[in-house]
Image (cartoon, rainbow, N blue to C red):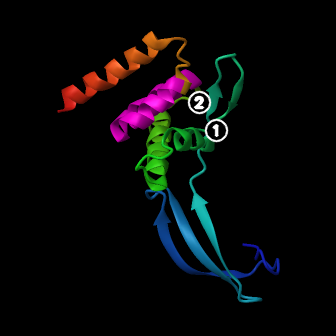
Amino acid sequence: MECPNCHQNSSRVVDSRPSDENRAIRRRRECENCGYRFTTFERIELSPLLVIKSDGNREAFNREKIFNGLVHAAEKRPITSDELSDLVDRVENSIRKKGLNEISSKQIGEIVMDELAELDDVAYIRFASVYRQFKDMSGFMKALEEMMSKDKKSS
């Protein structure tokens, strides 16, 4: 592994530990040339996943897009960054378990909303308002009623 400090190719592993729910290994390395310490991650190489957008175009699956959307929905809510990262992990795992190489953005949005409904009602409604692009108050009210009926069933 090339040292980011001196660019030599000799480093040794000082510490290894699992990361990202055992889907990655975090390695702490030390350059044998200059002594600089740095961190690397080893992950399983997954097959590429394409997202079919509403206009028919395809693009690579991007976890960051989901995370950023969730950050906006969860703004000023008692939700930690780790909880949002875990939610994105669950969404990606759910998609990959389907064994598909392509999935529609609509299906991804539904999976995100299902997961978010379990985490926070207000963030769910905020996300739904952007995702479903409510045209009028009736669409918004329908989403609220769905959320309230889920709350009654789980109580």
Main SS, magenta region, reads: helix
Instruction: Report if residue 24 lies within the magenta region.
Output: no
Q: Which residues are magenta?
A: 105-129
Identify the residue at the far left of this view.
155
Which amino acid type is shown beneath numbered disc 1? Pro
Q: Is residue 40 above or below residue 127?
A: below
Which picture quadrant has residue 118? Answer: top left
Circles 1 and 2 in contact, beta carbons < 8 Å: yes
Residue closest to the eye, 35 or 115: 115
x and y percentages locating residue 43 in the rendered image? 57, 57
For disc 1, the neighbor class at 10 Å (few under 14, some 14 to 19, many from 20) is: few
Q: Is residue 29 above or below residue 49?
A: below
Which amino acid type is shown beneath numbered disc 2? Asn
* Dot 2: element: loop
Residue 101's disc is: 2
Q: Decide if residue 111 is on the left or right side of residue 15.
A: left
Q: Is residue 90 above or below residue 26?
A: above
Question: From this viewpoint, is residue 153 visible?
Answer: yes
